[in-house]
Image (cartoon, rainbow, N blue to C red):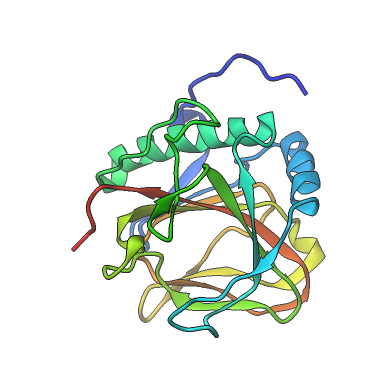
Amino acid sequence: YTLKPVINYNLENEKYIWDEKSQTVSIADYISSTDLRILDELSNKSYYFNYKNMKNANQYQHKIARLTFSRHPIVTKLAKKTYDIVHQLNKKYWNFDLNTHFKGATGNEMMLYADKELIEPHFLINQFGTGDSMRFHSDYCPDDKQAYRKIAVMLQITDPKYYVGGELEVNLGSDSLIALKSIGSATFYPSFIPHRVAYVKEGLRRSLIYFFIGDKSFS
C-alpha cells in the first residue's frame, strides 16, 4: 500500500457536529472504507489481553490490544489525521493545554502514559464480546497518571450489523447522549465527561481509542 506524501488535514473538510451540552464532537465518515478493511485485518491479527482496573476490577469487562502507529502506513496516516483534527477542535471549542506533537510514527512525540512511563505511540483497540460492557467512568482521574489526559478519541471500526448493544453513552446527568455507532465514525470528548459502553448482547465490537495529554491536570 503506497501513501501519498504527508498532508495536513483540515477540520473544515469534515462534516462534524458539535454538541454544546455534552461538549462532544462527532464525525460520521472519519475513516474511509478502504482504510477500514486494512484496520480490520490488523485488529484481527492483534494480541488481546484482559483489561482490569486496579481500583475496581469489575468496572471494565473487555479486552484490549495495542495498534502502534508504525505498524502500517494506514495507522500512521490515521494518527496524523487525528492529531490535526484534534488540535483544530481544541482551538475552536475546548482550549486545553496539550503537549502532544506529531513528527512521525516511530518517534516519541505522540505518547500515552502507562504506569508513569512513556511507551511507543499507539491506538488502543477496545474489544467487547458478548456479555462485555464498561460502567460509567471518566478517563480523567486527578490522583494518578490519568490527570494528564485532556481529550479522548473513539473511532468505530466494527459495522454495527455484527453486534447488538455496545453503544457509547455520555452521561449528562438527567439526560444522556448516544454517540455515533456507524462504522468509520469518530467521537471526540473531554476526558472528564462520564461515559460508558453498554452491554454487548451479541457479537463483537471493536473501536480505536487515543488520549491527548497535557503537562498539567485540570485540578
User: Which sits in the foreground, 25 or 132?
Assistant: 132
Residue depicted at 46% across the width and 27% down the height:
10
The image position of residue 46, as x and y in percent, is: 74, 52
| As drawn, 121 above or below 175 | above
- Count the marks: 0
User: Which sits in the foreground, 27 or 130?
Assistant: 130
Judge whether residue 72 can be spotted in this image: yes
Residue depicted at 35% across the width and 79% down the height:
173
> Is 211 left or right of 30, judged from the image as shown?
left
- Say which quarter of the image contains residue 125: bottom right
User: Which sits in the foreground, 11 or 103?
Assistant: 103
> Is 69 left or right of 95, judged from the image as shown?
right
> Is 45 left or right of 192, judged from the image as shown?
right
User: Which sits in the foreground, 47 or 156?
Assistant: 47
The image position of residue 59, as x and y in percent, is: 52, 81
| As drawn, 120 above or below 182 | above
- Say which quarter of the image contains residue 106: top right
| As drawn, 140 above or below 25 | below
| As drawn, 215 above or below 178 | above
Judge whether residue 14 can be spotted in this image: no
Q: Quadrant of the C terminus?
A: bottom left
Residue depicted at 22% across the width and 52% down the height:
216
Residue depicted at 45% across the width and 50% down the height:
112
The image position of residue 213, as x and y in percent, is: 35, 49
Q: Quadrant of the N terminus?
A: top right
The image position of residue 41, as x and y in percent, is: 81, 45
Farthest residue, direction left:
219
